[in-house]
Image: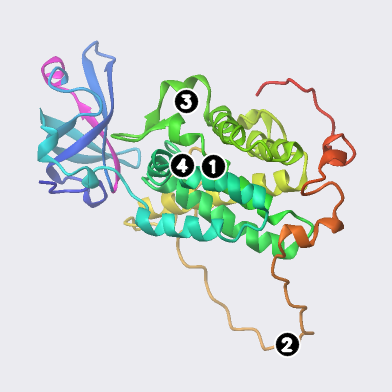
Amino acid sequence: MKKTFVAEIRERDQVESPFLVRDKITAMAKNGKPYLTLKLMDKSGELEGRVWDRVDELAARFERDDFVLVRGKASSYLGKMQLVVQELEKLDDQLVSLGDFLPVAAEPPELLLMRFKEVLGTLHNPHLAQLMQLFATDEGFVQKYSSAPAAKSMHHVYLGGLLEHSLAIAALVDDVSARYPELDRDLLVVGALLHDVGKIEELTYQRSFDYSDEGKLLGHIMLGVEMLEERLRQLPEFPKPLAVHLKHLLLSHHGQYEYGSPKRPKTLEATVLNYLDDLDSKINGIRSHMERDSQGDSAWTSYHRLYDRYFYKGEMPQGEPAPPVDQPSQPAVKKPQPASERRSTRPGFGFTLGDQLAGKNLDLFSAEPDDKES
């Protein structure tokens, strides 16, 4: 029964359509009258709703995360579309299709999982491959991993976003490992696939996207390390130095204390993972912001509060093509080798991380207190 999607609404439109209530806040206007602010969403985006009249009556009809049939008029305020709600009724869940209300990844979960299994098949390190099989054969985990968004609001905010984001970083790992062969490619791939794994418990995504109690109290980094440790206990032969190195990837992937990282990156792999995670997150976040503004006439997006700027979405002027210039041939980029074939190029890697973890190679950056909280 979905008639009008958020992305289709224009100023002065009369709207009568169902929405999912993502948020519901009662406030007081300057004249002392109460009003209601709603976050109304469907798979195409979010829209702010305002209830100015009959506030108590309409507010009593529904709660947050309910489906509601809304009738109102669209208007633009400070460059953002709003819906002035005139009538509102709660809908029975059986009358709506959930797929109309929650955004989903462009690729269906079946294809994302197929790509996930293909990546696991490229692992040469037997210990890392065995570890990932414990995750891949856990049906409950796989269902959540392929369904969860990667965040509540910043990037990959759609069902399947977590797996899409993790696979994108794993693909970037192959690109970077070809350029820097001293990196342990297998370790980085596993770090890419597991760095945000705690988000399957940190976030709730059966209705609107929000944080669970565990997510608010512990956060996805702690939850992810716990999930990793649970699998490592099932592998008594897993090398401890390798386990420590892998945990460090999860604990440091946010990069800095002010970004919620318990530790800063102190290995090459941890440094690379931090930058690739940040790169893919920002590209997705900016691209999504541009797509939300795609219907406007301006060549610039609306203001993005997180990045504190506007983004140019028009085509850059094209000059005359430069004449061809003879250039020396470039050396071919090597394909990444299995970690087992190049461990000798970097002492302390693979199954002999003892020297590095003892402190000889670990502190690539300046020293820091051991227990500083973010």
User: The disc labelled 2 sits on which kind of residue?
Assistant: Val
Does the rendering let one see residue 276? no
In the displayed structure, would residue 297 be above or below residue 306? below
Q: Looking at the image, is mark 4 or mark 3 earlier in the sequence?
A: 4
Label 4, label 1: how far apart the Cα atoms are: 18 Å
The CA distance from mark 4 to mark 2 is 44 Å
Residue at image position (64%, 61%) is: 174
Q: How crowded is mark 2: few (under 14 residues within 10 Å), some or many (20 or more)?
A: few
Q: How far apart are marks 3 and 2 (CA)?
A: 55 Å
Could you tell whether 128 is left or right of 62 in the image? right
The tag on residue 366 is none
Q: Residue furthest front?
A: 236
**In front: label 4 or label 1:** 4
Q: In this view, does 73 lie to the left or right of 186?
A: left
Q: In this view, does 315 lie above or below 23?
A: below
- Which residue, given by chain and number where applicable, does mark 4 sit on? 150
Q: Do the residues labelled 4 and 3 touch (CB within 8 Å)?
A: no
Task: Tell me, yes or no, if residue 370 can be seen here.
Answer: yes
Which numbered circle lies on residue 215?
A: 3
Q: Earlier in the sequence, mark 3 or mark 2?
A: 3
Q: In which quadrant of the rendered view does residue 361 lie?
A: top right
The location of residue 159, given as percent across then percent down, is: 36, 45
Q: On the image, numbered disc 2 is attached to which residue? A: 325
Furthest-top residue in this view = 32
